[in-house]
Amino acid sequence: MKKEDILVEKIKERLKERQPQGRYQHTLGVVKAACNLANHYGLSIEKARIAALLHDYAKELTEEELKSYIRSHNLEVDQSLLETYQLLHGIVGAHMAKIEFQIEDEDILQAIKYHTTGRLDMRPLEKIIYLSDFIEENREFPGVNSLRELAYKDLDCGLLQGFNNTIKFLLKTDKVLHSNTVEARNQILRKLQSNKTK
């Protein structure tokens, strides 16, 4: 058995202990979507698999557990993240992946860390994990099928639509909008507009 396969099995066993069945099924759906997108865009399927498996590794922690972990490990977080604790599991999950599974690959760690907000200058794997979280086969919401199609036509166009969906939802529900999401969305939009004029 390859080293990567042993790691994947170890992560899956830990996930089964940590996640309820529904969350685990979602995780497997994200793995499938991420591997398919990675294959489609010529990226490492192995990295996509590991990042997808671990993207919600800290999702089941309570607000107090997340904040306690952040304090005890001196992780840097801004006020918006602290106000919207549901976003903290990306940062905590990336740190746990490094400590518990000795993952040092920055592509994987950044993809886990920023899958909740996005950020400026996202790496290709970050884009894939962010999108896969939306388009995995268990997701059902208005427009999900067109988003799935768009993700395979153009990764940046899919990402822009994903950001737009998130922003619309947060505005509609009076939730705090993280500046990373706005900045990432605007950067992708400018890039796509610039490409059109060339």
Image (cartoon, helix red, strand yellow):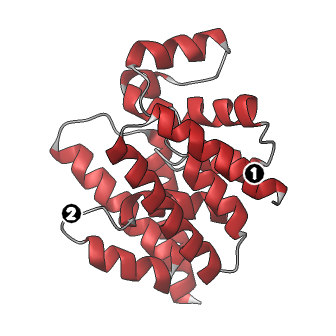
Does 180 sit above or below residue 152?
above
Does residue 159 appear to the left or right of 166 in the view shown? right
Instruction: Return the x and y of residue 81 as percentages of the image width and height.
Output: 45, 28
Q: Secondary structure at mark 1?
A: helix
Label 1 sits on residue: 6
User: What amino acid does circle 2 point to?
Assistant: Phe
Q: Nearer the viewer, mark 2 or mark 1?
A: 1
Instruction: Return the x and y of residue 83 as percentages of the image width and height.
Output: 37, 22
Q: Residues within 10 Å of mark 1 (few under 14, many from 20)?
A: few
The answer to which image quadrant residue 157 occupies is bottom left
In the image, 64 versus 13, the foreground residue is 13
Mark number, residue 141: 2
Asked whether the viewer can see residue 122, the reply is: no
The answer to which image quadrant residue 107 occupies is bottom right
The answer to which image quadrant residue 1 occupies is bottom right
Does residue 157 appear to the left or right of 94 in the view shown? left
Asked whether the viewer can see residue 70, the reply is: yes
Mark number, residue 62: none
User: What amino acid does circle 1 point to?
Assistant: Ile
Residue sitting at x 31%, y 51%: 167
